Image: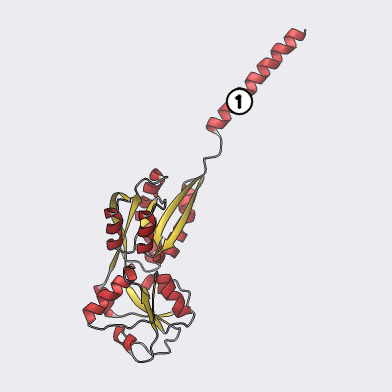
């Protein structure tokens, strides 16, 4: 009798082991993965809006963003910072990343953007155009040289012959916007998308010369990306109809 019971117990143990193995292979939770995206600061609102849908389509995946000026992001990657995707606010900084050997494949332009003048609500200084930024007593902030919005500002200055004397040069466009929102500056040169998403904290003054300094936004998978396959899928998601819809919602142009 004891031998029979022992045999039955052994069968039960084996059965339980087989059951556990099958459950793990077919019905377990998906592995947790993190996709790291380095993106220009001006993409903050659009990419944050795309995050939940991409994660819903990829169970177990968490998308994390590092937002900064494109030139800063290129420097970080060149210095060894790990990223899966890089989205730049201009072609020049993407070219630097390619030349620096940190990009895998061919970058693709997914959006365009242009400058506008951010001012306090109600435009108390009565700014009507780019040349007004040189009026006496005007506190103006711009992006630093090398940052895409700074390069665009330089292009407008060259095209118009108007030279600005900014109170400060910021490392990304969101810092410029903040200076205007807090009243530390009377005006700042930002992208139309930043003014559109400021929630009424600033007004914007469009000027025709901005059309001569359009920025193209390219995206690419980073070389040696820890999540290379997911990176490619995120790139395609940004390029999809849903991605374009979210981008155009805040004022990005289509290439």
Q: Is residue 189 visible?
A: no
Q: Position of residue 178 (x, y in %)?
A: 46, 75
Count of numbered tags: 1
What residue is at 40 percent from the left and 59 percent from the top? 39
What residue is at 30 percent from the left and 75 percent from the top? 153
Figure quadrant of residue 110: bottom left
Residue 240 versus residue 161 in the image, above or below: above
Q: Which residue extends farthest bottom?
A: 136
41 or 9, which is in the foreground?
A: 41
Figure quadrant of residue 9: top right
Q: Is residue 199 left or right of residue 191?
A: right
Q: Position of residue 249 (x, y in %)?
A: 40, 66
What residue is at 74 percent from the left and 12 percent from the top? 5
Q: Quadrant of the C terminus?
A: bottom left
| Local SS, label 1 | helix
Q: Residues within 10 Å of mark 1 (few under 14, many from 20)?
A: few
Q: Which residue extends farthest front?
A: 79
Residue holding disc 1: 19
How is the model colour-coded?
Answer: secondary structure
144 or 213, which is in the foreground?
A: 144
Q: Position of residue 22 (x, y in %)?
A: 56, 27
What residue is at 46 percent from the left and 73 percent from the top? 198
Residue 43 versus residue 233 in the image, above or below: below
Q: Quadrant of the N terminus?
A: top right
Residue 10 versus residue 207 in the image, above or below: above
Q: Position of residue 139 (x, y in %)?
A: 40, 85
Figure quadrant of residue 134: bottom left
Q: Is residue 142 visible?
A: yes
């Amino acid at each position: 009798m004891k031998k029979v019971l022992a045999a039955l117990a052994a069968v039960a143990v084996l059965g339980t082991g087989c059951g556990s193995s099958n459950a793990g292979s077919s019905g377990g939770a998906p592995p947790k993965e993190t996709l790291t995206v380095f993106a220009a600061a001006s993409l903050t609102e659009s990419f944050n809006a795309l995050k939940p849908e991409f994660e819903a389509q990829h169970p177990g995946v968490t998308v994390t963003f590092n937002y900064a000026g494109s030139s800063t992001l290129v420097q970080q990657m060149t210095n060894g910072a790990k990223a899966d995707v890089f989205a730049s606010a201009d072609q020049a900084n993407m070219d630097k990343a390619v030349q620096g050997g940190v990009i895998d494949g061919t970058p693709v332009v997914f959006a365009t953007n242009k400058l506008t003048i951010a001012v306090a609500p109600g435009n108390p200084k009565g700014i009507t155009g780019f040349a007004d930024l040189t009026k006496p007593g005007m506190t103006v902030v711009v992006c630093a040289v090398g940052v895409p919005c700074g390069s665009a500002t330089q292009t407008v200055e060259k095209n118009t012959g108007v030279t600005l004397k900014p109170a400060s040069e910021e490392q990304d466009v969101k810092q410029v916007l903040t200076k205007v929102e807090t009243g530390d500056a009377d005006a700042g040169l930002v992208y139309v998308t930043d003014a559109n998403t400021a929630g009424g904290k600033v007004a914007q003054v469009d000027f025709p010369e901005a059309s001569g300094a359009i920025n193209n936004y390219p995206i690419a998978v980073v070389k040696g990306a820890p999540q290379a396959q997911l990176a490619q899928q995120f790139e395609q998601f940004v390029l999809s109809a849903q991605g374009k819809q979210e981008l155009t919602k805040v004022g990005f142009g289509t290439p």
